[in-house]
Amino acid sequence: LVSRKRKNEDTIIDIKGEKIGDGQPHFVCGPCAVESYEQVKKVAEQIKKHGLNMIRGGAFKPRTSPYDFQGLGFEGLEILRRIGDEFDLAVVSEIVRPQDMEQAAEYLDMIQIGARNMQNFELLKAAGEVDKPIILKRGMSATVSDFINAAEYIHSKGNGNIILCERGIRTYETSTRNTLDITAVPILKQETHLPVMVDVTHSTGRRDLLIPAAKAAIAIGADAIMAEVHPDPAVALSDQQQQMNFEQFDAFMEAVRK
Ligand code: PEP
Ligand code: MN
C-alpha cells in the first residue's frame, strides 16, 4: 500500500494548513519532553515567532534508563492540547502503548511512533486504526526495508497518513549519537509515496551539526525537519546535550530557510 508501484502520486499530509509533502520544507520543533505548561508555552511563543504551525513534545518518554525522567503521561498531553488551542498550533507527541492510541487521538493532531517501537506491531496496528497522521520513526537498527514494512502495518489497518522519519541508525561510528542515513531520504521517496522527515536532533546528537544536517536533508529531498528546542537546555529533564536554546533556534531557522 505504501509502495510507489501501487500509487505514484505523492501523499500530502494536510495538518493545520501545512501540506507536508508539497515540495516545501516543513518544521516540527519543540522540547524533547513536556515538563510544564510554562515551559511549553515559552517554546510555543518562539515557534509562532518563526511562523511555524506545529509543536512537538514528549509525554511518554522511552528512556534508556528506568531511573531517568519518564514523562508526564496524559498530563503532558493535556498541556500540549491547551497550548495547541491557545496558540493555534498542531501538536505532536509520541504514544508507546496500543491501548492509549484512541484516547491520545483526542489530544493530538499527529501521533509519533518512536524509534524503539518501530517494530512494535500491535502499536503499529493501533496507529492504523486512528484518524490522525502518524510520524513513524526509523528503528535504530532497522533497514530501509524493515522501515517500509512497519509503515505498511499502519497503512494495512486503514491509516495512510504516514510520515517516515529518518532519525539516524546505530553504526560503529561514535562521533555522532547515531549515524544519519541521509540517502535513506531519496530511497524512501523513490520506493514509497509517503512524505519523509529528518530528525536532526536525535540523529546527530550534536548542536553544532543541526544546521548542516538540516540543510543536507532539505537538499536531498526531505519534506520536513524535526528539531528540539528548550527554553534552557542545561536544566532540561532529557536530551540536555542537543536541544537548542532560543538564540540557537533563531540562528537555525534563519540558516536553514536561506
Ligand atoms: C523523540 O523524538 O522524542 C524520540 C525519543 O526520538 P527517537 O524515537 O527517534 O529516539
Ligand atoms: Mn529528545
Image (cartoon, rainbow, N blue to C red):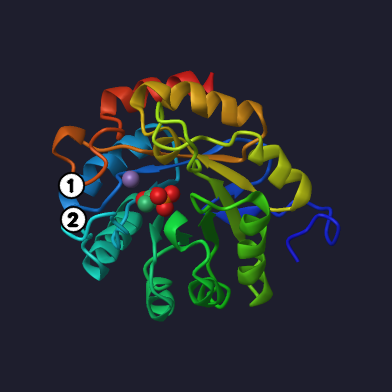
Q: Foreground: 131 or 99?
A: 99
Q: Is residue 248 above or below residue 197?
A: above
Amino acid at pointer 1? Leu
Dot 1 corresponds to which residue?
237
Q: CA distance from mark 1 to mark 2?
A: 6 Å
What's the residue at 61%, 48% (across, down)?
19
**Where is residue 252 shown, x and y percent of the image?**
41, 24
- Of callouts 1 and 2, the N-terminal one: 2
Q: Amino acid at mark 2?
A: Phe
- Residue 86, position in %: x, y? 30, 54
Q: Mark number for residue 160?
A: none
Q: Quadrant of residue 60?
A: bottom left
102 vs 49: above or below: below
Instruction: Say if mark 1 contacts mark 2, CB within 8 Å.
Output: yes
Neighbours of disc 1 within 10 Å: few (<14), some (14-19), many (20+):
some
Q: Position of residue 40 (x, y in %)?
A: 24, 48
Characterize the local packing of mark 2: few (<14), some (14-19) or many (20 or more) Cα atoms within 10 angstroms.
some
Q: Quadrant of the C terminus?
A: top right
Extreme-front residue of the structure: 172
Q: Secondary structure at mark 1?
A: loop
The residue identified by callout 2 is 69
Q: Is residue 253 visible?
A: no
Tell me which residue sits at (29%, 54%) in the image.
64
Measured along the vertical axis of the image, is residue 127 above or below residue 245? below
